[in-house]
Image (spheres, rainbow, N blue to C red):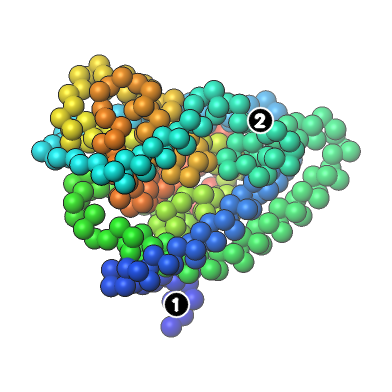
């Protein structure tokens, strides 16, 4: 029974038990939600300090600020190319599969009220607000914000300051090294309750929505998972192959993190573990520190796929005709708005509401009400794709920067 002590096996069992509880005792399943929420809050509590310590020690230890800038630019170009591809693939699948064709959407008063709640949150996702929120109001505020970008911004400034201090900065650097070890140890302790969190999350999701919601919207749900699968194994697979990696080996290597994300529907819960694992797998600490946190805001491949698929699904279901130019215009706007909702709970759905509310496509925003019931299930596909996408991005940028140790990361190579 040694296999029962393995974390990913425990998480998988938690997911299965949660599904069974939600199916057969839905009222009890709904009450399990706090188990997942407590775990997610505990992990998020540590994300900003870990990013701060990792980025500062990584950049300051390297001492080459020009290289840091080069890593940042390469990462941003990579992010933009890959997210554009994700949006285009979502657009193509939606036009070919026509998941909303022949449907008659009926947004109930309750669901329409929910849409108005999301629309209220959407005011915080504008590009201007996004840029303004990168700079924290206070030093401590960088560690209390929902987004990872304020912590990343502050960490880069502190790292630059330490580099300019020379020998005097080494004392602070050594202290931050020790502090980061404490935070990673805390992550290891909290992660032990991940199976309980996965159980609670799945019991709540299945219990609150029920299997009838999945059956009713199975086509669009299937399209999201199929498209995410195509993107991971075809697009990211090709990127890995061109850079000497194997997508299958990469996925196998991060299976613990993937199951954690599957159970909690949040890619952020795996961020600390992912950073630590990538460092141990041969990626330069400074590359990991810059690419992973920024990727969680700028490299949301799964979210991009969902955005185009969901928007066109609603258009098809409400018989709203969109010309090719209107679809391309929607894609262009989504390239910007997909970056603006980073760190916001329900970011994918909120971004969609914000986008359709601000551009004149004729797609009724109220039509999104039907997707609320299955958004939790689609968020799992988004989160898994985002996690794999950011893992591949870090490996690729590390390889480009000659910051990948092939001896340590040999298990990821083809």
> Does the image show residue 374?
yes
Instruction: Determine contact: label 1, label 2, CB under 8 Å.
Output: no
Residue 29 located left or right of residue 98: right
> Does the image show residue 402?
no
Q: Residue at 18% across / 51% down in the picture?
A: 216
Q: Is residue 258 above or below residue 22?
A: above
Q: Is residue 3 above or below residue 204?
A: below
Residue 296 located left or right of residue 228: right
Q: Residue at 82% across / 29% down in the picture?
A: 164
Looking at the rendered image, the quarter that the N terminus falls into is bottom left
Residue where numbered disc 2 is placed: 135
Residue 206, by quadrant, is bottom left
Front residue of 231 and 167: 231
Within 10 Å of disc 2 (Cα), the crowding (few <14, some 14-19, many 20+) is: some
Query: Element type at marker 2?
Result: loop
Q: Residue at 43% across / 28% down in the picture?
A: 337
Residue 4 numbered mark, or none: 1
* In this rendering, the label closer to the viewer, 1 or 2: 2
Indicate the position of residue 49 as horizontal and vertical percent values: 68, 48
Within 10 Å of disc 1 (Cα), the crowding (few <14, some 14-19, many 20+) is: few
**Residue reaching furthest to the top:** 325
Residue 291 located left or right of residue 110: right
Measure how far apart labels 1 and 2 are at the Cα level.
Answer: 45 Å
Front residue of 305 and 66: 305
**Residue reaching furthest to the right:** 168
Indicate the position of residue 315 as horizontal and vertical percent values: 21, 31
Query: Element type at marker 1?
Result: helix
């Amino acid at each position: 029974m040694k296999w029962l002590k393995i974390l990913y096996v425990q998480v998988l069992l938690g997911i299965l038990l949660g599904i069974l509880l939600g199916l057969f005792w839905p009222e009890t399943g709904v009450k399990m939600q706090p188990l997942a929420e407590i775990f997610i809050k505990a992990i998020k509590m540590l994300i900003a300090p870990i990013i701060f310590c990792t980025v500062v020690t990584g950049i300051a230890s390297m001492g080459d600020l020009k290289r840091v800038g080069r890593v940042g630019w390469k990462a941003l170009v990579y992010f933009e190319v890959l997210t554009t591809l994700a949006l285009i693939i979502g657009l193509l699948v939606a036009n070919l599969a026509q998941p909303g064709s022949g449907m008659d959407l009926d947004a109930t008063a309750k669901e329409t009220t929910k849409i108005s709640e999301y629309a209220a949150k959407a005011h915080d996702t504008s590009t201007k607000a996004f840029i303004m929120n990168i700079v924290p109001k206070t030093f401590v505020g960088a560690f209390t914000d929902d987004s990872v970008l304020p912590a990343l911004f502050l960490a880069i400034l502190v790292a630059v300051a330490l580099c300019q201090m020379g020998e005097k900065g080494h004392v602070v650097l050594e202290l931050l090294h020790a502090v980061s070890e404490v935070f990673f140890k805390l992550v290891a302790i909290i992660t032990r309750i991940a199976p309980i969190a996965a159980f609670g999350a799945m019991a709540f999701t299945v219990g609150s929505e029920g299997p009838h919601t999945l059956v009713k919207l199975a086509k669009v749900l299937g399209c999201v998972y199929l498209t995410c699968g195509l993107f991971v194994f075809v697009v990211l697979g090709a990127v890995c192959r061109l850079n000497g990696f194997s997508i299958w080996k990469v996925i196998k290597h991060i299976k613990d993190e993937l199951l954690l994300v599957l159970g909690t529907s949040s890619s952020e819960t795996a961020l600390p573990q992912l950073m630590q694992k990538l460092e141990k797998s041969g990626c330069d600490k400074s590359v990991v520190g810059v690419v992973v946190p920024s990727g969680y805001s700028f490299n949301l491949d799964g979210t991009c796929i969902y955005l185009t698929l969901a928007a066109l699904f609603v258009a098809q279901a409400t018989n709203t005709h969109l010309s090719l130019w209107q679809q391309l215009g929607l894609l262009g706007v989504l390239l910007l708005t997909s970056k603006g909702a980073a760190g916001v709970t329900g970011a994918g759905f909120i971004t969609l509401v914000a986008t359709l509310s601000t551009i004149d496509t004729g797609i009724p925003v109220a039509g999104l009400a039907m997707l609320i019931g299955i958004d939790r299930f689609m968020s799992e596909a988004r989160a898994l794709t985002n996690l794999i996408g950011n893992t591949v991005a870090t490996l690729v940028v590390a390889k480009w920067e000659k910051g990948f140790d092939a001896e340590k990361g040999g298990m990821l190579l083809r």
